[in-house]
Image (tube, grey):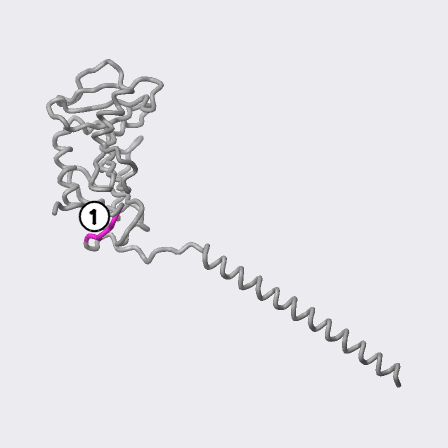
Amino acid sequence: MTDLTSQIARTKRKRGASAGLVFALAALVVLIVLAAAFVALVLWPRWPATSVAPDAPALPITIGGVLFNVPPGAVRVAMQRRPGAQERLDLAFLWPSLEPPDPNARPAPSEGMPPIDRLFITIEPQASALTPSDRVRTIYPRYLAETQYEGPDGLKVIPFREGSPYRGEDLFFDPTAQPGFVTRCSRPANGTPGICLYERRIDTADVTIRFPSEWLTGWRALATGIDSLMLRLKPSN
């Protein structure tokens, strides 16, 4: 009888140990699942709300603390087509109408590369204390060649030296105004058109405008159009 009692006690102890082990394993599994769920919740990408339709009214979008009024149809990236603060904004406007492109339009068939018919604009927070005009006065002269020649419609042109960070590009500027119209342009090559970069600083936001270098034949109208477009995006107070 004593042996039987001892055997039963040992069996109960073994069952208790097994139950404890099962409980510990179950608790560990629960903890692992909860930890995985927490990590997934933290790291899973949060997509913004549905983007606004291209034909909706202008959106209030803040870049670098600067408020812009942006027509949705001009926003090139659908995820950026929403109001509020953003890190970057990519826009396009038809030239010379300065209207947003028709989202339903399809380019006409053509041989080779179709002509560029729009201004491309990037707005980002101010990257440095150096303004675009400061860069023209203090940085570019270090890399310019000594040669200067006549450009389109009264502009002057100075190429950048080979081996400089801007090799293969030219600086176009209006010699009659200081500061005046200044743009840095790549040279056409292998069927690829030259592209110009025209930079502006609006409060604490940097604006970069890109357009084909062939448009410089009418640079005065282009400069006026850019000024008008900037006033539409950021009306003066």
Could you tell me what secondary structure mostly forms the magenta stretch? strand
Q: Residue at x 46, y 54 (%)?
A: 43
Residue matched to label 1: 68
The amino acid pointed to by label 1 is Phe
- Verify whether residue 61 appears in magenta: yes
16 is higher (above) or lower (below) than 134: below
In-front residue for pair 26/46:
26
Q: Residue at x 13, y 23 (%)?
A: 153
223 is higher (above) or lower (below) than 42: above
Q: Position of residue 230 (x, y in %)?
A: 17, 41
Question: In the figure, residue 110 lies in which quadrant?
Answer: top left
Q: Residue at x 86, y 82 (%)?
A: 4
Q: Position of residue 228 (x, y in %)?
A: 13, 40
- Describe residue 98's horizontal placement relative to residue 195 as left or right: left
- Verify whether residue 148 appears in magenta: no
Q: Residue at x 81, y 80 (%)?
A: 8
Q: Position of residue 12 (x, y in %)?
A: 77, 78
59 is higher (above) or lower (below) than 217: below
11 is higher (above) or lower (below) than 196: below
Q: What is the magenta range?
A: 58-63
The N terminus - image quarter: bottom right
Q: Secondary structure at mark 1?
A: strand
In-front residue for pair 148/36:
36
